[in-house]
Amino acid sequence: MKSLVVCYSVSGKTRLVSRVIAEALNTKVVEIKETKTRRGRFSLYVIGSFGALTNKGSKIKPLDLNLKQYDRIFLGSPIWASRPAPAVNSFIYQTDFDDRSVIPFFTMGGDNADKALANVRAKIEKSGGKVAGSFAITTNKVSDKQIVARAKEAAKQYSG
Ligand SMILES: Cc1cc2nc3c(=O)[nH]c(=O)nc-3n(C[C@H](O)[C@H](O)[C@H](O)COP(=O)(O)O)c2cc1C
């Protein structure tokens, strides 16, 4: 089964988890980037949270990506306001998953991803994907080493 990891990350935690997953599954990470860098706390926390809360997308750079080559897409986002980040919404809205398996995952400051997972599941299904698993990793006051260990643990259930 050929997998791909797609992620969006501002402070690097979701990127870190994505790299671990990609390495474990012998594939690469494709990063979603916004056209405008979020500079400053207002743009990130206020506009970012509001966008996430209202299920908005944001402008993202075109991705050089042919999903047809993959059976399974891991899709990583930080949790913003209990939801996926707007850039990840944009990716989902503009993608036809064409019945592919999608495994959404989150990194988060807190420890509850239920709302975010329900939210992203509905969006993925609306774009033609089948949610075939999910996981979430807490990053607040957790060392990168521990995050890597948790990501390796999560990857185990999808390898082999
Ligand atoms: C705008 C914004 C909103 C956030 N909202 C939440 C939240 O609702 N729940 C939560 O657990 N963490 C929240 N966080 C924390 C991030 O999910 C967490 O730090 C995540 O690991 C960051 O991922 P990144 O380093 O890949 O950007 C928020 C962070 C930002 C910047």
Image (cartoon, rainbow, N blue to C red):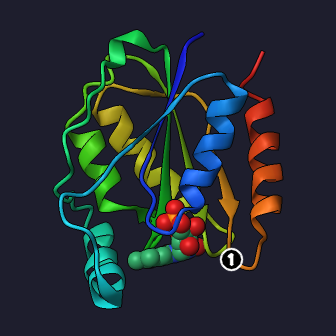
Q: Nearer the viewer, residue 38 or 100?
A: 38
Residue type indicated by callout 1: Asn
Q: Quadrant of residue 36?
A: bottom left
**Residue 62 as seen in the image, left or right of residue 73:** left
Report which quarter residue 39 is drawn in.
bottom left
Q: Nearest the camera: 37 or 81?
A: 37
Q: Is residue 154 left or right of residue 49?
A: right
Which residue is painted at 34% across and 77% down in the image? 49
* Mark 1 residue's CB less than 8 Å from ligand 1: yes
Q: What percent of the width, then of the height, locates residue 23? A: 68, 31
Estimate the x, y position of residue 70 in percent, counting from the top left. 45, 15
Indicate whether 158 appears above or below 34: above
Relative to 93, say whether 42 is above or below: below
Q: In the picture, residue 83 is in which quadrant?
A: bottom left
Q: Residue at x 29, y 89 (%)?
A: 42
Of the 4 image quadrants, the one containing the N terminus is top right
Residue positioned 19% across, 37% down in the render? 94
- Kindly identify which residue carries mark 1: 140
Which residue is depicted at the point 24% across and 49% down?
90
Q: Secondary structure at mark 1?
A: loop
